[in-house]
Amino acid sequence: MRFPLALTSKIAKYIIGNKIRGKKKFATVLQLEPLHTCNLTCTGCGRIREYSTSLKDVMSLEDCLGSAIECKAPMVSICGGEPLIYPQIEALSTTLLEKHERIVYLCTNAMFMRRKMRGYMARELALHPGGGMEGKINRLQADGLLTEKDVAEIRKGPKDINAPVMAPHPFFFWNVHLDGLEYIHDLIVEREGVFKEAILGMRMAKILGYQVCTNTTVYKETDMQEVEDMLDFLGEFGVDGHTISPGYEYDAAKADMVKRLNLQPDDFFLTREGTREKFKDMPEWSKRYSLLGTPIYHEFLAGQRELECSAWAIPTRNIAGWRGPCYFMAGAGHFKSYEDMLNDVDWTKFGVNPATGEARDPRCENCMTQCGFEPSGALSSRLDDSWKNLVYNFAAKPKPNGRGREVNAYNGVTAGRGHLTGEQVKKTMAGPKIEATAAA
Ligand code: SF4
Ligand code: SF4
């Protein structure tokens, strides 16, 4: 099967149950942002810019769990900011998995992923000294994924044996942000070395038995051949699934781009037409790669059909409340509860009319993002769509094609092709230099 049976059945049962009860609007995925602090400053990230005045604030563990209980979505995507900075991330993730039986996607830039997994290893080794962890330690050390110092730390054991850790779980996924191969990814995240660390983290996770997926945002300059190469490369070490979606032009990100990097947003973000051109091969890719999402959304991205926006199905909860109407836009404000958001947002004012192609709000005009349109595919009541979803989910998982071994993934700083990024860019205001290197 393309995705684990327990996972697919859990989601299907939840959707069917709501439909039988006659519920028109309900949440399928909760986007939970316990904090907006991040250790990176990616070009195009609206979060760290829009919430720049509350970067130090965090949601309490109680509030985080309360929002999951409140909206009932079977999947919780913990994002941010960088969620691995959240002080109670282990408790949050473990409680959602074990007590509330949710599927958890932890969206991360992977810079702290190996550290968190070492925490799990230390606890596991202390609890089961004769178990399989010794063999895994040897393998990880041989593969250069653990240093001698790391191994010594693991052997010391955890400070508190009862403290929760980020352990593998059938419903837990690391969801790693990856926007291309080394050169492009490091350019977009504005720091060299991030791609390399993300790959080390994912390889280590697969050896330890975690489920791993990636999320990739496609921009105007994204070379789709490079995305395909990246999928082949990731397939070689067993990455389980991929989300690929078009970049949305946040107001905050656009303003930052002009001010800080001297870049023009129109050169960076996709229009609807541009999205369809970039994603024209999605339906075909979904046969060759484990793409997350529905075949209906893939057809929509490829321009083969229209969909209504269903942003209410993937609500966002953060320090300011329930963000309406969607993850991208707080045009209707922040609400006290999910129910308030459902009732008080005038949903007829957002999205794009599928019959006329007319945007109901100018900010929706170029949006074809996953948060708005993926649920429309999953929730479609058309019989042919339900059949398509069923066939897609129960189809055999695509196997790596071997091309990944030939991909030149480390084509950036590792190959001596560094570029000015991060702090250096700020100091030199080297916008034109970024453009020149991006096109190189
Ligand atoms: S890692 Fe994520 S939250 Fe952090 S700056 Fe990049 S896109 Fe934004
Ligand atoms: S179309 Fe996009 S921007 Fe508009 S409400 Fe839906 S998800 Fe948000």
Image (spheres, helix red, strand yellow):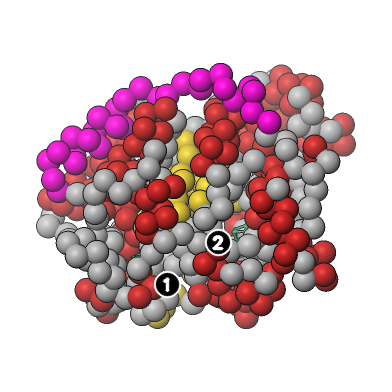
Q: Is residue 33 visible?
A: no
Q: Which mark is residue 268?
A: 2
Q: Secondary structure at mark 2?
A: loop
Q: Quadrant of residue 309?
A: bottom left
Label 1 Cα neighbours within 10 Å, binned few <14 / some 14-19 / many ≥20: some
Ligand 2 quadrant in view: bottom left
**x, y (%) of residue 24?**
17, 61
Residue 96 versus residue 423 in the image, above or below: above
Q: CA distance from mark 1 to mark 2?
A: 18 Å
The answer to which of 437 and 197 lies nearer the viewer is 437
Per the rendered image, the range of residues in magenta is: 381-408
Q: Residue at x 19, y 41 (%)?
A: 385
Specify the amino acid type for callout 2.
Phe
Q: Residue at x 56, y 72 (%)?
A: 254
Label 1 beta carbon within 8 A of ligand 2: yes
Residue carrying label 1: 329
